[in-house]
Amino acid sequence: MPQRHLPPISRLNRRHHANTIRKDLPVNGLKDKVVLVTGGGRDIGKACAQRLAQEGANVVITYFGSASGAEQNVSAITAAGGKVIAIRADMTKAADAQAAVDKAVSEYGRLDGLVHVAGGIVARKTLAEMDEAFFREVLDVNLTSLFNVTKAAAAAMGEGGSIVTFASQAGRDGGGPGALAYATSKGAVMTFTRGLAKELGPEIRVNSVCPGMISTTFHDTFTKPEVREKVATATPLKREGKSNEVANLVAFLISDESAFISGASYDINGGTLFS
């Protein structure tokens, strides 16, 4: 029997085909889950909340300095038919972290997932430029906050719970100029994730996401345009990532589709390779 030769799919058709599939295949195992998303007022946290709500999750977002962004996100999710509430919380304070978890449980009856996005670089400083107070501030923002919210959330979760932490490419390669404290804290996030996965399993899974150059206000503020362009063009995909692309990965890790994944740190950086 003669072989049939199908015409090649163009790049444009590939993208169209992929988009069509994406819309037709929702993430299973998210409907009616209760998920707490910290840093839900902007950028990646905002996108994560929207993605989870889109799949039917009941979402609680926290914010600290982005009240208007959180309000806009609540309005957008609600207008799209999703369920969401927002609470102001400083995750470096244990009482605030506990209050956020308590709010999720009181509003929806339980807690199934945690996505801890809140964090930051504070400022770019070299070792010579920083003092102990600055170093501790960065560790508080990225590590103390993680400790506080995961401790509160884990105590409230039952079997089948899922926690997603946020590390960074900087935690793997040491970061760019002036990112020593930030990179140190994000490397520790990955170690914390692995250790916590051992402690909380088999009831609760814990994984980490390590974004590379993503188009966010973080890089608008702390990364020079020429550096961003250099990093983006060095990746095989020749561009920066988008917040919604990170959110797609997070939705998978929170969902039951990733039920046998724990203790892993996922790079999402356009194919950046490390020496």
Image: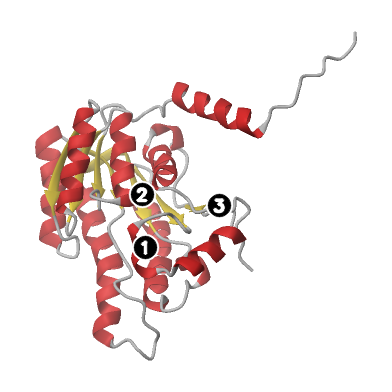
The N terminus: image quadrant: top right
Q: Secondary structure at mark 1?
A: helix
Which mark sits nearer the N-terminus, 2 or 3? 2
Q: Nearer the viewer, mark 3 or mark 1?
A: 1
Residue 158 in percent (x, y) is at 25, 39
Q: Nearer the viewer, mark 2 or mark 3?
A: 3
For this orientation, the residue located farthest to the bottom is 128
- Give the quarter of the image for residue 122: bottom left
* Residue 217: x %, y % from top left: 33, 59
Task: Kindly identify the amino acid type of the residue bearing the numbered disc 3.
Answer: Gly
Where does residue 164 sit, x and y in percent of width and height? 36, 49
What residue would you read off at disc 2? 164
Q: Characterize the local packing of mark 2: few (<14), some (14-19) or many (20 or more) Cα atoms within 10 angstroms.
A: many
Contact? badges 1 and 2 (CB < 8 Å): no
Along the polypeptide, which appears first: circle 3 or circle 1? 1
Q: Which residue is mark 1?
A: 220
Hey, what amino acid is under mark 2?
A: Val
Query: In the displayed image of the protein, which residue is found farthest to the front?
Result: 226
In the picture of the structure, the residue carrying the numbered disc 3 is: 270
Question: Farthest top residue?
Answer: 1
Q: Is residue 170 above or below residue 83?
A: below
- Spatial CA span between label 1 and label 2: 25 Å
Pinpoint residue 90: horizontal percent, then vertical percent: 16, 61
Number of numbered discs visible in the structure rendering: 3
Q: Amino acid at mark 1?
A: Asp
Say which quarter of the image contains residue 31. Answer: top left
How far apart marks 3 and 1 lie (CA) works out to: 19 Å
Q: Secondary structure at mark 2?
A: strand
